[in-house]
Image (cartoon, helix red, strand yellow):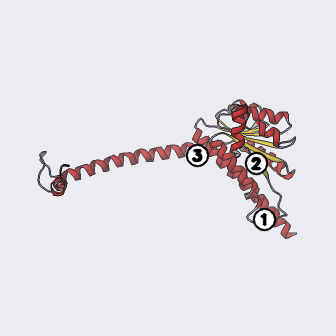
Amino acid sequence: MPRQIDIGTFCRPYLSSEPSRSGSSPREARSSTWKRAAMESDRRDVGLAEDISAYLGGFQRTLEAIAVDDLRAIIGSLSDAYEAERRLFLIGNGGSASTASHLACDLAKTVSGKTINPRVKRFRAVALTDNVPLLTAWGNDAGYETIFAEQIKTLAGSGDLLLVISGSGNSPNILEAVKTARELGLHSIGLLGFDGGAVRSLVDLSLVIPSDDYGHIEAAHVVVSHLITAHFVRQLFRHEASANAG
């Protein structure tokens, strides 16, 4: 037969003010435990504040070190592709793949405006990171290094533009994609980190985020992506204002 537990007897040590064997009451013991927990929390808060300050300070220094002239050149190249209605293909791995998808979405939709306007030229931006069945098919049958290059062979043509987003700049599938793009007559841009890696010497234009922290590099790439989008949105507003004034 299971042992019966008397709830009153079980709870008495937690509710009673009678001294415990250590000489303090359970309430005093609980109070001491809470004080220790509060002290631990305070120490954690101090450590957290230091971590937040260090991270944000480091990221601010990373942003301030961005080469603005390189960024201007990249925006100029994107503008040329936009005006000529060339296709823009974006690639990346991991977090950089999500940035490639994000930027492609912003350029293809946000730059077109909030409403459908047939007078507005569309940015023909496509992220080659998004078709998971196709990526896995090429990866499984021909090797992971081919997943972007083979799509470029299928979709791209001379004069189109390839935008590479990569922290290290050394991923085999990124290098293979840029080499294929060069062979097909595409122009190429790299948003990179660290020292730019091997791909830096292969692309036509590059912006290297001067950091050895992957988090700072990837976050800076997102900031640059939003900056690029903001520029084209402002350009759209300026063109619309000019057309309406005329």
93 or 49, nearer to the observer: 93
**In the drawing, does residue 129 fall left or right of residue 35?**
right
Gap between marks 1 and 2, in whole Å?
19 Å
Rate crowding at label 2 as few (under 14), some (14 to 19) or many (20 or more) other CA atoms within 10 Å.
Answer: many
Q: In terms of secondary structure, where does tag 2 sit?
A: strand
Instruction: Give residue 143's quadrant in the image.
Output: top right
Choose the circle earlier in sequence order: 3 or 1.
3
- Tag in front: 2 or 3: 2
Q: Which three-letter amino acid code belongs to the residue tagged 2? A: Val
- What residue is pinned by disc 1? 116
Residue beneath the point at 76% across and 31% down? 201
Choose the circle earlier in sequence order: 2 or 3.
3
Residue beneath the point at 70% across and 43% down? 133
Gap between marks 3 and 1, in whole Å?
37 Å
The x, y position of residue 189, in whole percent, is: 76, 40
172 or 44, nearer to the observer: 172
